[in-house]
Image (cartoon, rainbow, N blue to C red):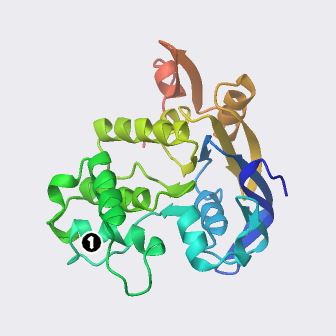
Amino acid sequence: MNAALALQGTELCASLGGCQVLHAVQVGFAAGRWTSVVGPNGAGKSTLLKVLAGLLPGSGQVHLLGQPLQQLPARQRARQLAWLGQNETVADDLSVHDVVMLGRLPHRPWLGGPSAEDLAAVERALRTTQAWDWRQRTLGQLAGGERQRVLLARALAVEAQVLLMDEPLAHLDPPHQADWLALARALVAQGRTVVSVLHEITMALHADDMLILQQGRVFHFGACADAATHAALQAVFEQRISVHSIHGQWFALPTFFLHPNAPTTAP
């Protein structure tokens, strides 16, 4: 175990429906850095995140902040690691405030009411995601993007050192996607560790590091600004995207747009 890593997975294997999805994956995420996880459909991105979070059984070892994940008491694990998953089911009749307060359960005594600290954490999270004004509405009254911001607020309310987010940009419009990027950078500036699965490759290139998966194995791990990472990214997507710097920012552009006169195949 590398004590300098906030989260580490060793020889991780996992299966879904009798089919092996992860094949002896080894990953390590340093404290105070944001890593984006990308790869083609079916590469095992969401499965890896669930195994790292302890939400999906598998073989291998996961260490969280230097300790074996499975040996941590449930409440301690829930305080140290926050999770935002895809298409999470939450009762639609719960108020927005109550949904976000769920993120404070690991900090509260059994059957105890919320403390002033809990209430302050929930307010901070809701204001950060610009959802404070909806706090009395029910989750079922919200649009998809609004609901996603509330679930993000619930993860933030935990105030964990490590945050795992699977498709956090789902349903968000471009301005709120930009807000999420700013939030990820702010969390890292506070010393938190962020690991996020993203399909939006240009957004993923804003991270510090990039983990590229292919067919359940690590294809590449490196800094988002490195040429080797860009080459690996283009290779794993079969040269159908190309990475370019525009005004000092990295963009992943479909190769069709780079060669508009190239012949196309009619559908």
In the picture, which quadrant includes the C terminus? top left
| Percent of width and height locating residue 257 | 46, 23
Q: Nearer the viewer, residue 21 or 67?
A: 67
Quick one: quadrant of the N terminus?
Answer: bottom right
Find residue 103 and report its horizontal and vertical position in percent: 41, 67
x and y, in percent, of residue 37 in the image:
61, 47
Q: Which picture quadrant has residue 135?
A: bottom left
Residue for badge 1? 98
As drawn, the residue found furthest toward the bottom would be 111
Q: Amino acid at mark 1?
A: Asp
Looking at the image, is 133 positioned above or below residue 101?
above
Quadrant location of residue 136? bottom left
How far across and down, in percent of the image, does residue 6 sit? Answer: 69, 52
- Which of the two residues, 225 or 228, is positioned nearer the viewer here? 225
**Residue at position x 55%, y 16% in the image:** 245
In the rendered view, does 73 fall on the left or right side of 138? right
Q: Is residue 22 left or right of residue 89?
A: right
Residue at horizontal 48 percent and vertical 30 percent from the top? 264
User: Image height check: is 182 above or below 120?
Assistant: above
Viewer-closest of 199 and 57 = 57
Q: In screen coordinates, is 53 left or right of 172?
A: right
How packed mark 1 is, by other alpha carbons closer than 10 Å (few <14, some 14-19, many 20 or more), is: some
Q: Quick check: 52 above or below 208?
A: below
Picture mark count:
1
Based on the displayed image, in which of its 4 quarters is residue 142 positioned?
bottom left
Please give the name of the residue rendered at 68% of the width and 44% of the height, measured from the top-left corner: 211
Disc 1 on helix, strand or loop?
A: helix
